């Protein structure tokens, strides 16, 4: 279980994050949702260990990891546009981190990930020959083979074509289920956050505006910000889609 | 994109005609001259040049000394650029490194040689400091040091730019994947930098191979191809057709190098996004690279100290009293002040006309569908590959019997052509980045194309044009290689006057004139920087 206790982050006199308290159970998907500049990426970086919180604690499975360096936390990240090494092919990108392990490469388990992510036909392709979705799957495979405790994803859908977004959402959910993998996703899209995750954390101006399951958020918005900016958008979307199919929502 | 109009075609035609007249025909003249015999076309000139051992010897001298200099330059440039981008050295120190390493660009290369003599020669400042000369400065050593000083800024800027566009998130990935030091260095820095490193080496090599100023001043008896070409053309027994052959021999490696650079660039690693720099450097690395770079920059600046010491001492090296008499003497010499005015005139005209030409070429190339627009890319490649001495020689052959001979016009035209590549690419890149629908928007709002260019494009490209102005001005101020063939007693420039003063050992005058160039260039740079800063604050 991941716990954040009173996390605070300031740059100079500006508080980017104030009093963030969260818990996330193993195997769950959590979204950090909010408008740009709300502090969600900073929070992601703090969990990853890339940035140091000004104060507060991070606890993973009962151990205080607040001061642990990034490499030793055992978390991993899939970047927004994937950060694949352009001089290596898909396969070499996938096993990039395994080459650093003394025990060598367990080819069987690598193949399992490759099969699960349907990457077998693309292994010899150069990075620039892959489509956006394939790149993302290679990037996910590269982190999964390292068997991270938590998978962090920075805007996983925003660099992809609209048409494949729904499939990718399903894929992220199935990865989390299949490997019982705790997943944290940063997004600015309410629909994405609410349809993808078990738990949604809505950030506004550096603090948590609401934290709960998608159902809770939709049925009991905690304040006006949630009501006006999150739910209103979804209602308009719903209306448009119903109108498109010639139906009425009751 | 907007439809091609007669106006665009007309502008394209005029500009191309200019390049034919000022670039293609002079270069053609060199080629023709190399095949010209007493009676008709012949290969005799080549046979003669290649059969004599002299040309072979100087060619290999040039290749050898340029290679050594290029290796040293590449290593140093990498060290400096790496320190700036991948260590936590304090920002002001990074700025000093950046400015320090580019300072030599503001001086003509011929000055470097004389500075080296006064630093490391028998009576040099450092020789006196250590009690004896550290090494012989004339010949090979002097050439290597001079070439390194000359090529380091360009090589550094190339790597500095490349590193600016590197994606620092790969370093995060590498850390997360538990890479060791060397594996991280290979995958996140060395591998993506391979092509810029190769590019920097080739650039340093070509610049050294084709430079005239440094061997002219400090070459001693170590003959290189540039000095041989000068001797053949303007020595006691001028031999034009032999000169043409030598310049073709000089052109060959330059062309080869540029082609290789083009191929290397294709293998360039391109990153989709540029990330914020992440400070991952350990303290040891920061201290190690930081102090290494600072030492390089201090050594580099120290070499130039004679420039400010010698002309202000009463009688170097016998009387070290401070004096302004040499300085006052130069100011009161109308001959020398006229030379300075000539240089200023050439630099201002080159910069003004150069900005116009680079802008029009960039505009037609980036924002029209003109069929001839591809030609400008070819032209930019040609001006990049042709050494200054070869182009200068072409002008000499082509304009020799015309009324343009010995005018400022051909010097300015030469400078605009010779330095065309960088300004053109600067303008073109800037224009390409701009929204492609501006012209259509303008047209829909009832602008003519020229009005849109004037009202929308020009204001948005102003910053780049100021940079182009500064680039042209400074380079015109320091250029030596080609203009030595073009100046007459009326049009003599500071950089060529220095060559003349060398014969009379008037080193105080040489250094004071060099300081004039340096200060003028610094002033122009500061004015341009000031303007750019003000602009960016507003915007």
Image: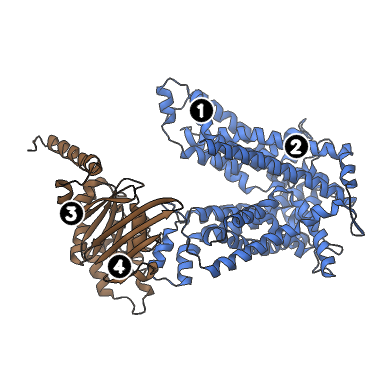
Judged by depth in the image, the label closer to the viewer, 1 or 4, is 4
Q: How many numbered circles does the render carry?
A: 4
Q: Does B157 sit left or right of B444 as displayed? A: right
Among the chains pictured, the one given blue colouring is B
Q: What residue does disc 2 label?
A: B344
Among the chains pictured, the one given brown colouring is A
Chain containing mark 1 = B
Q: What residue does disc 1 label?
A: B453
Q: Does B486 sit left or right of A193 as displayed? A: right
Q: Give the alpha-carbon distance from disc 3 to disc 1, as whole Å.
A: 55 Å
Residue A59 numbered tag: 4
Q: Where is residue B290 in the image (x, y as percent from the top left)?
A: 60, 64
Q: Give the alpha-carbon distance from disc 3 to disc 2, as whole Å.
A: 73 Å
Chain containing mark 4 = A
**Quarter of the image containing the N terminus of chain B?**
top left
Quarter-wise, where is residue B330 in the image?
Answer: top right
Judged by depth in the image, the label closer to the viewer, 3 or 4, is 4
Q: Are marks 3 and 1 on the same chain?
A: no
Circle 4 — which element?
strand
Asked whether the residues under the numbered discs 1 and 4 touch, taking CB atoms below 8 Å apart as contact, a structural biologist would say no
């Amino acid at each position: 279980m991941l716990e954040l206790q009173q996390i605070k982050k300031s740059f100079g006199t500006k508080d980017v994050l104030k009093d963030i308290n969260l818990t996330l159970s193993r195997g769950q998907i959590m979204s950090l949702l909010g408008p740009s500049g709300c502090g969600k990426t900073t929070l992601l970086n703090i969990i990853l260990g890339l940035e140091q919180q000004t104060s507060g604690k991070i606890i993973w499975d009962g151990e205080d990891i607040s001061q642990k360096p990034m490499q030793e936390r055992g978390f991993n990240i899939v970047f927004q546009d994937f950060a694949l090494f352009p001089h290596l092919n898909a396969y070499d990108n996938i096993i990039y981190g395994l080459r650093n392990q003394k025990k060598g490469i367990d080819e069987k388990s690598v193949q399992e990930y490759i099969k699960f992510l349907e990457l077998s036909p693309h292994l010899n392709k150069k990075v620039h020959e892959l489509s956006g979705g394939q790149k993302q799957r290679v990037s996910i495979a590269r982190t999964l083979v390292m068997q991270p405790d938590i998978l962090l994803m920075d805007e996983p859908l925003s660099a992809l074509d609209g048409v494949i977004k729904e499939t990718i959402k399903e894929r992220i959910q199935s990865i989390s289920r299949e490997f019982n993998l705790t997943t944290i996703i940063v997004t600015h899209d309410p629909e994405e956050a609410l349809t993808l995750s078990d738990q949604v954390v809505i950030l506004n101006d550096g603090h948590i505006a609401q934290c709960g399951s998608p159902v809770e958020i939709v049925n009991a918005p905690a304040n006006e910000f949630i009501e006006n900016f999150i739910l209103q958008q979804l209602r308009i979307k719903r209306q448009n889609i119903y109108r498109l199919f010639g139906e009425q929502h009751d | 994109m907007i439809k091609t109009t007669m106006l665009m075609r007309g502008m394209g035609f005029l500009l191309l005609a200019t390049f034919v007249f000022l670039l293609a025909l002079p270069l053609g003249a060199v080629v023709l001259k190399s095949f010209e015999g007493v009676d008709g076309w012949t290969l005799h000139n080549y046979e003669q040049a290649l059969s004599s051992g002299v040309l072979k010897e100087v060619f290999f001298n040039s290749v050898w000394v340029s290679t050594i200099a290029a290796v040293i330059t590449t290593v140093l440039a990498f060290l400096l650029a790496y320190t700036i981008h991948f260590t936590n050295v304090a920002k002001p120190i990074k700025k000093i490194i950046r400015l320090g390493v580019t300072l030599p660009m503001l001086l003509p290369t011929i000055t470097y040689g004389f500075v080296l003599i006064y630093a490391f020669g028998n009576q040099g400042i450092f020789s006196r400091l250590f009690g004896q000369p550290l090494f012989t400065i004339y010949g090979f050593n002097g050439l290597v040091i001079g070439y390194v000083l000359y090529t380091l800024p360009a090589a550094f800027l190339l790597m500095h730019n490349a590193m600016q566009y590197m994606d620092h998130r790969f370093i995060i990935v590498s850390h997360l994947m538990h890479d060791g030091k060397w594996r991280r260095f290979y995958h996140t820095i060395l591998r993506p930098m391979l092509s810029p490193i190769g590019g920097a080496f080739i650039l340093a090599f070509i610049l050294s191979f084709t430079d005239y100023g440094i061997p002219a001043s400090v070459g001693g008896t170590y003959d290189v191809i540039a000095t041989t070409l000068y001797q053949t053309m303007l020595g006691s027994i001028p031999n034009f057709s032999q000169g043409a052959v030598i310049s073709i021999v000089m052109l060959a490696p330059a062309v080869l190098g540029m082609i290789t650079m083009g191929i290397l660039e294709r293998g360039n690693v391109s990153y989709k996004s540029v990330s914020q720099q992440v400070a991952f450097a350990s303290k040891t690395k920061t201290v190690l690279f930081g102090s290494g770079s600072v030492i390089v920059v201090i050594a580099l600046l120290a070499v130039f100290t004679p420039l400010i010491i010698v002309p202000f001492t009463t009688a170097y090296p016998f009387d070290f009293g401070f004096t302004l008499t040499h300085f006052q003497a130069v100011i009161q010499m109308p001959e020398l002040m006229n030379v300075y005015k000539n240089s200023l005139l050439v630099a201002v005209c080159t910069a003004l006309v150069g900005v116009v030409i680079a802008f029009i070429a960039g505009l037609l190339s980036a924002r029209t569908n003109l069929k001839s627009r591809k030609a400008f890319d070819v032209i930019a490649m040609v001006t990049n590959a042709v050494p200054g001495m070869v182009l200068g020689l072409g002008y000499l052959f082509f304009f020799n019997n015309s009324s343009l001979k010995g005018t400022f016009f051909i010097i300015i035209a030469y400078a605009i052509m010779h330095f065309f590549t960088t300004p053109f690419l600067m303008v073109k890149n800037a224009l390409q980045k701009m929204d492609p629908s501006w012209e259509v928007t303008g047209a829909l709002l009832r602008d003519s194309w020229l009005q849109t260019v004037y009202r929308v494009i020009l204001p948005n490209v102003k910053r780049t044009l100021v940079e182009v102005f500064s680039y042209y001005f400074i380079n015109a101020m320091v250029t030596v290689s080609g203009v030595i063939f073009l100046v007459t007693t009326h049009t003599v420039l500071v950089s060529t006057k220095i060559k003349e003063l060398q014969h009379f050992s008037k080193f105080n005058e040489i250094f004071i004139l060099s300081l004039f160039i340096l200060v003028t260039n610094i002033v122009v740079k500061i004015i341009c920087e000031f303007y750019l800063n003000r602009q960016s604050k507003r915007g």
